[in-house]
Image: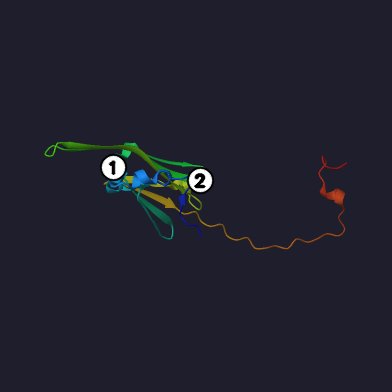
Amino acid sequence: MYTMIPFRSHHNMPRTHEMMPSLFDDRFFRSFFDMSDWMGSNAGFRVDIRENDTNYLLEAELPGVDEKNIDLSVENDVLTISADLNEERKDERNCYSERRYGHVTRSFSLEGIDQEHIVASHKNGILYVTLPKTQPEPKKEARRIAINANCGQDEHLTEGEQQ
């Protein structure tokens, strides 16, 4: 049985907050760099994956991201979802504005997925991707091969292989 798991190409690379823990542990800077109120986590965006007998349904939360700013691609058996973030919040009463810009991406292995029939839609800040499962190859039964004792080695060689 196949499973749908995130694809991690750089899992051994140190994260920024591990390299500079004192800066990111400071309460003032933590709120500045934290995008969890907007995107769900500061590692990217939230994804839920559900499974039935024939498909996986991947739901990626991308609130405030327009469909034209989302890129969904398949390359080398990996599905990649990436999005450009561009949001500005203004509060005229309190005279402040907040801007968030950036790029987020997540990738998933497509082992056991019929890649030619993947479909996607976007509604209310959620990207829905239907990933149809491939039908498993039926197991081939072992077959017995008869050994012919009367056949010489030269009879098995093609003309180019004979000396």
Do we see residue 147 in this rendering? Answer: yes
Pick the quarter of the image with the C terminus: top right
| Residue 78 shown left or right of residue 92 in the figure | right
Could you classify mark 2 by the number of other residues whose Cα lies within 10 Å: few (under 14), some (14-19), or many (20 or more)?
A: few
Type of amino acid at the residue the image marks with label 1: Phe
Is 91 located above or below residue 135 in the figure?
Answer: above
| Residue 125 shown left or right of residue 10 in the figure | left
Element type at mark 2:
loop
The residue shown at (13%, 39%) is 94
Q: Tell me the colour scheme of the image.
A: rainbow
The residue shown at (46%, 42%) is 74
The residue indicated by pointer 1 is 32
The residue indicated by pointer 2 is 77
Is 67 located above or below residue 110 in the figure?
Answer: above
Marks 2 and 1: which is nearer the front?
A: 1
Do we see residue 83 in this rendering? Answer: no
| Residue 28 shown left or right of residue 158 in the figure | left
Element type at mark 1:
helix
The residue shown at (50%, 47%) is 12
Q: Position of residue 63 (x, y in %)?
A: 28, 45
Q: Nearer the viewer, residue 17 or 74?
A: 17
